[in-house]
Image (tube, rainbow, N blue to C red):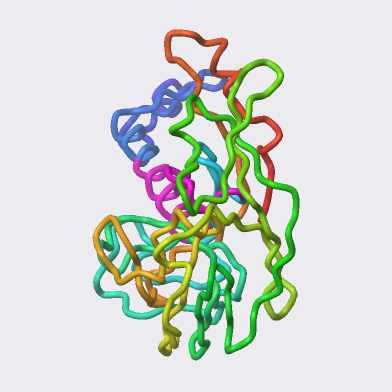
Amino acid sequence: MLRELEEKTGDGSPQPLPGEPRRRTAFGWLRFIVSLAILAVLVRSLVIAPFNIPSRSMTPTMLVGDYLFVAKWPYGYSRYSFPFTPDFIEGRIGNGRPDRGDIVVFRSPAEPASSYIKRVIGLPGDRVQMIAGELLLNGEAVARDAVPDFSEPVDDASGCASEPGSNSRLESADDGSLVCYTPRYRETLPGGHSYLVLDAGDSTADTTREFIVPAGHYFLMGDDRDRSADSRFPPAPGGGIGFVPEENIVGQAFVIFWSRDGSASWINPISWFSATRWNRIGSGF
């Protein structure tokens, strides 16, 4: 009877007695870890992946320190959907494509190893131009309405540009802290997609030539118009992106799952909570 209960399992380990917990062998642990790794790669490649905001080019929609999930399924898949960018995949698999106003994560044409995040402004065939800080799409001015200024705390005056040509202004709050105010507008694209943008003042890309978006490409811009290196600038490592090929698009911004203001200190656990911007968690796009 005892010999029957100790028959070997498929991986060579003894069959446990009734009521005895099964002991995982080294091979069993390896198989479990490999299975988890494969599942993680599949989820990250095909379903959803995390992304953080390192710069202010998408302010006020996204803030530095936001952490968000990027949905992979809305636009189909390309080699950039996968962590190891396999070269044998060409173009996109699936029929979904971005629409005007979508916020997308993509690989820069100038440095494909780097991921960026911007808003889709121009679709293939569109004509895009900036004149005196206002957006024109296919020869028509995009609706732009003033809303209350965007306010953000700054540590000192250098954090709020106030040189000639700037639209930002620096003020002191009641507690003595400094606050920078920047004009904010609501743009509404054809089709009704609406979002907020900032106009910090005169910049080199406030007036541009007319861009005609090639087939299979998109024209992307940041919401902080004067502090965004985007499709208005030629592709360059760490700089502009030019027209973005559709295969470079990784996915669509989905939801903020965490946000912190940068004031946390590793040696002060309490600051981990005080630095969290709780009101931003769960915000979608």
Q: Is residue 42 above or below residue 133?
A: above
What residue is drawn where x is 42% and y is 82%? 209
Residue 19 placed where, x, y %? 57, 19
Which is more toward the observer, 131 or 55? 131
Residue 102 placed where, x, y %? 59, 67
Residue 98 placed where, x, y %? 56, 74
What residue is drawn where x is 58% and y is 35%? 170
Q: Is 41 contained in the magenta span?
A: yes
What residue is drawn where x is 34% and y is 43%? 34
Q: Residue furthest front?
A: 164
Horizontal side, residue 243 vs residue 47: left or right: left
Which corner quadrant holds the C terminus? bottom right
Is residue 108 visible from the viewing direction of this image? yes
Q: Is residue 216 above or below residue 159?
A: below
What residue is drawn where x is 60% and y is 35%? 152
- Displayed quadrant of residue 79: bottom left
- Displayed quadrant of residue 42: bottom left
The number of numbered badges drawn on the structure is 0
Which is more toward the observer, 133 or 266? 133
- Displayed quadrant of residue 177: top right
Is residue 258 visible from the viewing direction of this image? no
Which is more toward the observer, 59 or 254? 59
Residue 122 placed where, x, y %? 53, 79
Q: Is residue 70 above or below residue 278?
A: below
Q: Which residues are magenta?
A: 34-60
Q: Is 13 contained in the magenta span?
A: no
